[in-house]
Image (spheres, rainbow, N blue to C red):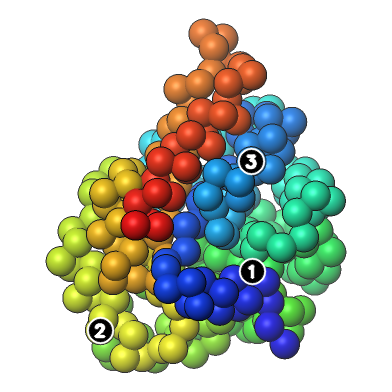
Amino acid sequence: MSTRIDDKFAALKKEGRAAMMTFVTAGDPDHETSLKIIQGLPKAGADIIELGMPFTDPMADGPAIQAGGLRALANGATMKKTLALLKAFRTEDKTTPVVLMGYYNPIYVYGVPKFLIDAKAAGADGLIVVDLPPEEDEELCIPAMQAGLNFIRLTTPTTDDKRAPAVFKNTSGFVYYVSVLGVTGTKAPDLKSVAANVKRLKKHTSLPICVGFGVKTAEQASAIAKVADGVVVGSALVSAVERSLNKQGKPTAHTPKAVQKVVAEIALGVRK
């Protein structure tokens, strides 16, 4: 049975272009504004939405996304509210794939069986859980797949040919290629390295490979879209949220538009 993610990539293949994927943190800068932000993402050019589950210790995230998570938590974000946000989004949008992205701790605390039931009911299509390796597949990956959710794995420049089969074994939906070593949003991707590694990893999987970490401009997105199946933009959007806040750190009427403007600009690069 195909998911919204599978259907989206099939449609994009017919169009002959890569996916524009956007990451925003649930509840950043507050619940109401966050909903307006994600509601506007598809119209701005997002094909797939990654919705960050706020966590106090996001080890793979750079300063921008860390700050976004802290803003969300300070304004009362919880896993329950994150799922409520997604459910509210689904009342208007039944087709845009949404992937919940984050760390295992909040899911574990919520309770894996309950989380999978509630995430599916809210309208989630897949999960990216940064700190669960293939060796822990029984913990969440396999139950998630049995619940009808895609489990999307991260690969990096250090995922060699020996490691790749284990990484891809229970992966579905797409593969997220982390283009730089280190945390999000701190370095620009090396396009030659990205092209070579995407080509190499495609020998191990027929799944779409999407590239993220450090993509901030339409030019970067355009170059990556020529060698990968999707381009992920995150820190640039979370930074746009931060820049739009007033002196008291509160959102303004301009906040959703500020994020959507960046999405629209970078989406043009993906569609070139």
Earlier sequence position, callout 1 versus callout 2: 1
The residue pinned by badge 1 equals 126
| Res 224 → quadrant | bottom left
> How far across and how far down the image is residue 70, in percent?
56, 33
Residue 82 vs residue 202: left or right?
A: right
What number of labels is visible? Answer: 3
User: Image point 67% across, 71% down: which residue?
Assistant: 4
The residue pinned by badge 2 equals 200
User: Image point 29% across, 76% down: which residue?
Assistant: 198
Residue 40, disc = 3
Q: Residues within 10 Å of mark 3 (few under 14, many from 20)?
A: some
* Type of amino acid under label 2: Arg
Say whether residue 263 is visible: yes
Residue 2, disc = none
Asked whether 199 or 30 is in front, the reply is 199
Q: Residues within 10 Å of mark 2 (few under 14, many from 20)?
A: some
Earlier sequence position, callout 1 versus callout 3: 3
Asked whether 131 or 12 is in front, the reply is 12
Q: How far is mark 2 from mark 3, CA to CA? A: 36 Å
Q: How far is mark 1 from mark 2, CA to CA? A: 25 Å
Q: Secondary structure at mark 1?
A: strand
User: Image point 25% across, 59% down: which residue?
Assistant: 223
| Res 151 → quadrant | bottom right
Q: The C terminus is located in which quarter?
A: bottom left
